[in-house]
Structure formats: structure tokens, C-alpha cells
Image (cartoon, rainbow, N blue to C red):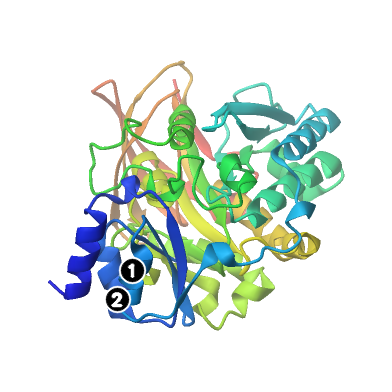
Amino acid sequence: MKKSLVSIAVLFSLSSYASVKIEEEFYVMGQNPEVIKDLAQAGSVEIDHVTSEGFEVYGPKGLSKVLSERSLPFFDMKSILKSALADYPSHEEITRKLKAAEAKNPKIMKLFSIGKSVTGKDLWVMKISDNVNTDEVEPEFKYISSMHGDEITGRELTVKFIEEIAQTYGTNQELTDLVDNTEIYIMPSMNPDGSERKQRANANGYDLNRNFPDISNRNGNTITGRQIENQHVMKFQASRQFSLSANFHGGTIVVNYPWDSTYDRHPLDGFIKELSLGYAELNPEMRSSREFAGGITNGADWYVVKGGMQDWSSFFYNDLQVTVELSHAKWPRYDDIPGFYQSNRESMIYFMKQIHRGAGFKFNRPGVAGTVHVKQTSPVAKDLGSFAFNSSEFFKVMPEGQYSFSITENNKSVRNLEVTVDKDRIFKDGNYLVID
């Protein structure tokens, strides 16, 4: 073991990513793959936003000593002056904006809280659908932002997006079609305490995007020991049938797709790349990126993350998720937010529409649960695995082709279904097959 790694282990006492408490945070200048590897292997520090210019590192007290021992050039990120912070809305002002959007168009907007943060702030979610008070059998999509409290751009963009839908539903045909055929859920802030404190972690000092169950433990999908914000999101996820989602961050500009925690490729790797490129192509800064080819990156190829939302959502819940980094500055000037919204608006709409590139089934009987084994039969043969379903419905986003669904209801084989996925059938009947 290298001396540097021994030093890290002694100082920090090795532990899982989910238990890392952030007490020091630094930016290390320059990219040294061996240094990054050593720090990441220690397990009690977090690496983030690796670029050709440097990387961020977070950890407990003593981190600065380790960096100094390696003679690494670094500076304390807490010392960076965040200009114009006072211009940003408070949590209370965000709440008022969301309630105003709901009041403007209550037919399609329903605001609710999935729980409270460490300090008691509501974790707001806006449901958007044409029959918002009815749980319809439609593909379910979600956006979640700002689980890192100091990455604020996504919070502002999702609120603006909600406000635009409330304002233009019925006149903007594209948005109207999307709302009429989809159940959309948007959470602008998963970490309101962190945003209030202008910090990455929650009020307990923990990184929420290292606090989800890791996919290396198939039996580890439990809320036990998680931060309260993670627990609420986990319960919310388990109560719905999400099939496609994204979470918004800041610190660079790129779409990051799974897997984050392993160098293995996702079973739908090519399809995920296609969706990610679709988002990036509509964003001027992403598509012209010199750091990331095409404005996208595989998560683990960039840097490994354990306990992240993206892998957890995709692995345990059949909810294909990507991570979108929206701005180089984590807390840009508030005057720049309209520009970021214009750069991402078409991408956000495009990505939401892709929820309809899939197929599923619904039972006419309520309360049916079971499993479905999915195989692609054309244009290539591929086994996509088995997935659990409940609430009498199942839907999966998949590339164009022919598929077979082998459905088991309550441990009893029901039937095999042949289904077709056609990207040109967005907003048309045929997404769901009906089972009596």
C-alpha cells in the first residue's frame, strides 16, 4: 500500500461512502490520475467534478493535511466569494412561487410535500398532469434537483419550467401534449437546508448523493441509517412507477449516464447514450464541449460514485436516470439564470418526451403485483432481465424494436405478451397492453 493511502486510512478510518461526513472541502489543481485513485480508494473522501484543470475533494477533518503531505496545490472552496447570493429566492419564496403556479392552473398542477428536511423544511414535489387528482395509467417521469445544496441552478430552472407549463398549457401544443399524456413529477430542491447554508451537504453534514443504497448489494435497498431526505425520496420512489428521470447538478456542463459505481456497461448502454446525446445536442454549451465528447460522459469513466441516486434509481426501480450538470459555476449570478433556462429548455422538453419511447401493460384488476421478464427479440436478441411491478401496471423505456414480456402474477405464470416500441408513436395509443 502506498504511503499516501496509509495516511488517508489512518486519518479517516475507512468507511463507506454513505457515512462520509463533510467537514473540509478543497479544489485540487491539476489532474493526477494516481492521486485521484488513491483518494477514491480510501473510501472516506469524495471526489467530484474531475476535469483537465483539477477536481473537488470532500472529507472529514485532516483532509488538508493529507493534501499538503502530497505537495498538492489546493485551495479551500469555502473561501470562494459567491457573489450576488442575496439575489436568490429563499426556501419560503420558492414555496410561494410553487403555490402560485398551482393556483394559476390547479387542473394540471398539484403541489405536495413528501416529507421534511433535517430542519423541518418541506420537500416539495409538483405533480403535473391533465387529470392531476387522478392516478392515471400513463408513463411516469420525474426531475429532481439540488441534492447538493450549493448547486443551485437546477432549482431555479425547474421552478421556471413549472411556471411556464402553468402559464402556457392549452396554448403551447408541445407542452400540452406532454402534460395530457404523461404523469410528471418535479422536485426543485431535495436539500433545502444545504441551499440555505450555501453548502453541498445537508444540515447533518452528509452528501445526499453518496447516501443511497449501492447497487453492489442487491439486498441492501433499505432506508435504515439513511439521511432523512434520502429516506423520503426512497419512499416516494417506491410508491410510484417512474420509468425515466434526471437529477440536476452544477459544477460543469455535461450529461452523465450510468453506471456511476462500476465500469460494467448498463444493459441499455447504447440507448442511454442516445438519450444523453439528445439532451446535449439541444444545449449549445454541451454540444460544443471540449472537455466531454458530444457533451456526455459515462459516470464511472469520469469518476466512480458509490451510493448515488442515478444508479440506485436505475438498478432497483427500472427508472432509467441520468445526471445533468447545468453550469460551471455552482452558484452563478442570479442574472444568468434566464440564459441557463434558455440553454436547457428544449433539452428538458426533449428528455421528458422520451418517456413515451417504451411499452408496458396494465391489469384491469386493481392491486396486482408480480414480476415481468423482458427480452428484446428484434432487431437484436437481448435479455434485459426481470423487473418487479405493483399497482397493476408496468412500463419500461426501451429502444425501438420487438420485445417479449413474460409476466408472473403472485408467483403464478400469467402469459407472454409481444410488444413493439416505436419512437414515432409518441403521444399515441398503444403504449400499454391491457390484461383482464
Per the rendering, the mark at residue 337 is none
Query: Is residue 147 at least partly visible in the picture?
Result: yes
Q: Point out the image quarter for the C terminus.
A: top left
Per the rendering, the mark at residue 65 is 1
Q: Point out the image quarter for the N terminus.
A: bottom left
Residue at left offset 69%, top offset 27% = 132
Residue at the left extreme of this rendering? 1
Q: x, y (%) of residue 400?
A: 47, 57
Q: Where is residue 56, by image quadrant? A: bottom left
Residue at left offset 50%, top offset 57% = 323
Seen from the viewer's position, the closer of residues 371 and 122 is 122
- Callout 1: SS: helix
The residue that disc 2 covers is 69
| Left or right of residue 87: residue 153 | left
Q: x, y (%) of residue 267?
A: 33, 57
Q: CA distance from mark 2 to mark 1?
A: 6 Å
Seen from the viewer's position, the closer of residues 97 and 425 is 97
Mark 2 and mark 1 in contact? Answer it, CB < 8 Å: yes
Q: Where is residue 290, by image quadrant? A: bottom right
Seen from the viewer's position, the closer of residues 242 and 148 is 148
Residue at left offset 56%, top offset 69% = 252
Is residue 19 placed above or below 224 in the rendered structure? below
| Left or right of residue 259: residue 219 | left
Is residue 417 placed above or below 209 in the rendered structure? above
Q: x, y (%) of residue 89?
A: 76, 46
Q: Amino acid at mark 2?
A: Glu
Is residue 177 placed above or below 56 in the rendered structure? above
| Left or right of residue 420: residue 217 | left
Q: x, y (%) of residue 390?
A: 40, 26
Query: Is residue 50 at least partly visible in the picture?
Result: no
- Callout 2: SS: helix
